[in-house]
Image (cartoon, rainbow, N blue to C red):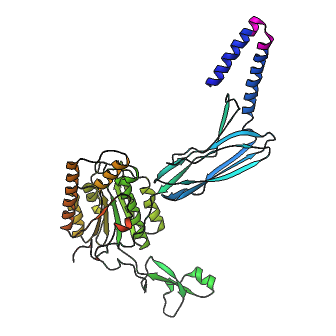
Amino acid sequence: MLRRVQLVAVGLVLLVAALTTGTQFLYFLVYLGALVLIGAWLLTRLGLSGLEAGFGVDRPQAQVGELVRAWYTLRNRSRLPKLWLEVHSPSTLPDPIPGRALSLGSRATRSWFVDVPLTRRGHYRIDPMAIRTGDPFGLFTASAAVGSGTVLVVYPAVEPLPAWKLPPALIEGSDAHAARTQHSTPLITGVRPYVTGDAFNRIHWKSSARQMELQVKEFDLEQTADLWLFLDLDRTVHSGTEDEATIETGVRACASIAAKAAASNRSVGFEAAGTRRFVVTSDRGPRQQQKVLHLLAAVQPDGHVPLQELLVDGLARLRRGMTAVVVTPSLDRSWVTPLASLRRRGIGCAVCIVDPLAHADRSRALDGEAPLDAEERTLMAADLQALRHALAEHELSPHVLLPVTPLATQIVTRSARVGVPAR
């Protein structure tokens, strides 16, 4: 815009000078400037005519650490070449989707792919593809948006926990059994040919029609022990920034534990309290795991509900035989009391303490800030030790989680009886 104003001002000055002096050369400059201005406008106006474009991403969900592939297609239906096109897709991703500047010949087509690394969980908006063109002098520009926007959900990374065994419940049927059972349960594992004595209500008629002989359903023993995850989102207890924040380690722990439970065919429930309360009712299967991951992709430490209140509120959803897993950076010992009450009701417990001191130290070191003063460090270390002693009184040995450290080396079962109430 400024360049056009400057050109018009220069043209007016030349026109006044030409009219005043009558110099032919000044008239020539005025005509030349007018032709350049009109030609630049026409070139820009025709720059997007006859142009077809398409853009998309290969999937709507992905996980941290993966690559999402975006594709672009441009097709020039016009006989006139497109000398300069700038193509990109605006988004809220931490790493922007790369664009490209190119030219298209007459009736030409260009397609290409770009891979974008996903470095942070969240729900991200990808806007429609933007195409911009202009004239060589930069006097005029024309732009257009193609398609509709989409949302990309980036789930937190899920890490395997091979050395951690889910705390068992105190009722039969709480462990996975590969042995077949004569009782009907929701866990159908397959079909087999009918033998004398099989109940007619176990016949699978569709399989029987395909196999041209009677087929009956087989069942596994049902797991009745549910797993409930409690994630502390109280903003007053979280520390650190970006990947070194306590919330990121806590989210990774919840995602990995939920995946472990889903692989063990346990029902999984989730509860947290941020600006609003999040409750995912207990269920099993890949769809339930996806629900939990979808929620974990968006949670932030923006709540005002302390962990003690969160656990008290969750008492009504827990019953004998369930397992409660608490993930928190809180060093306040007040939440140990409601946790102990769960154990007295026959509910298994496991605790993951996200070390706030270690996360604060690493964040400050990466940001170039001075470490915490000695008095504050000593106080936080003493609070952590006191919390561990308070949990030990109830036969709980917590997993203390450090930043940017594989969870498989931190969430480890120390004993087959850890986290299970004494009989």
- Examine the rendered structure and indicate whether residue 330 appears above or below residue 30: below
Picture quadrant where residue 85 is located: top right
What's the residue at 42%, 85% (across, down)?
179
Residue 172 magenta-highlighted = no
- Examine the rendered structure and indicate whether residue 122 appears above or below residue 134: below
Q: How far across and down, in percent of the image, does residue 384 sit?
A: 23, 58
Q: Is residue 317 visible?
A: no
Q: How far across and down, in percent of the image, does residue 3 sit?
A: 64, 24
Q: Residue furthest bottom?
A: 196
- Examine the rendered structure and indicate whether residue 334 appears above or below residue 266: above
Residue toward you, 92 or 293: 92
Residue 19 magenta-highlighted = yes
What's the residue at 69%, 14% (across, down)?
12
- Examine the rendered structure and indicate whether residue 405 appears above or below residue 7: below
Quarter that holds the N terminus: top right
Q: Magenta region: which residues?
A: 18-26
What's the residue at 41%, 69% (across, down)?
260
Residue toward you, 81 or 180: 81
Picture quadrant where residue 388 is located: bottom left
Quarter that holds the C terminus: bottom left
What's the residue at 54%, 89% (across, down)?
194
Residue 233 appears left or right of 121: left
